[in-house]
Image (cartoon, rainbow, N blue to C red):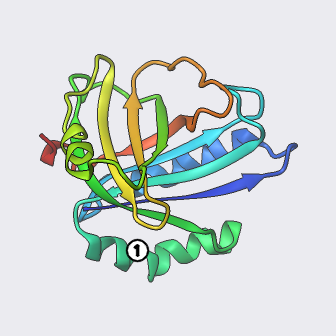
Amino acid sequence: MFAMQYSHRLPARHDMEAIRRRAAQRGPLWDHTEGLVFKAFVAQERGRHRAVGHLYASVYLWREPAAAASFLMGERFQNVIDSFGRPRVESWLPLDARAGAARTERATWLRRSERALDADADRAAVFAAQAREPEAGVVATWSALDLAAWRIVRFTLLTDAPDAPDAGDGDAIYEVLHLAQPGLETLP
């Protein structure tokens, strides 16, 4: 598996309805993509869930790393570059991924949580702790290791809006505009 995200900061006066229309138009093109577990088209709007500005992002969980490479080197990613410029792509090594009890419901929110992995941490215990059953209202959840910064990054697709994160706690909340999920059924 392979996980990644790229984000586009948008001007304060950017038309977020245009972003919603873009996600509604382009999202279904991903609904049957080979090698993909999910692609979440997500956004943040200034003032909602402590967002400091407008942001449009794509969050991926790939079953096949080769499919991610093909996307990044192909025409689909060129469309991203042509529309928004070439973004910095964050990438992670997945540690665990699970479908939740709400897997058949519509995901409306994505929570991204990060925490540093201390140098003296029991890495085996941290790895084992990632394999936990999702809580109620979860469509899917996955955790990944940021190898460059030694952080654990956890993504949770939710049916209901989560509580707003506390300032500085390493959480971000995104509205899900479209969720392509061709490989959801492959998760335990």
Mark 1, residue position: 71
Taking 35 as reference, is 43 above or below it? above
Looking at the image, how many numbered discs can be counted on the residues? Answer: 1
Residue 142 rendering spot, x and y as whole percentages: 31, 43
Q: In x, y percent, where is residue 159?
A: 40, 22
Does residue 115 lie above or below 166 as drawn?
A: below
**Crowding at label 1, few (<14), some or many (≥20) Cα neighbours within 10 Å?**
few
Residue 2 placement (x, y as % from top left): 31, 63
Amino acid on which disc 1 is placed: Phe
What is the quadrant of the C terminus in the image? top left
Q: Position of residue 117 (x, y in %)?
A: 41, 50
**Element at label 1:** helix
- As drawn, the residue found furthest toward the front would be 120
186 with respect to 92 (left or right): left
Classify the position of the N terminus by image quarter. Answer: bottom left
The residue positioned 45% from the left and 83% from the top of the image is 73
Q: Is residue 51 above or below residue 69?
A: above
Residue at 57% x, 72% y is: 79
Residue ID at (42%, 47%): 153
Q: Is residue 95 left or right of residue 162?
A: left
Give the residue at x 70% y 28%. 50
Tell which residue pokes out farthest to the bottom in this image: 73
Which of 179 and 48 lies nearest the eye of the viewer? 48
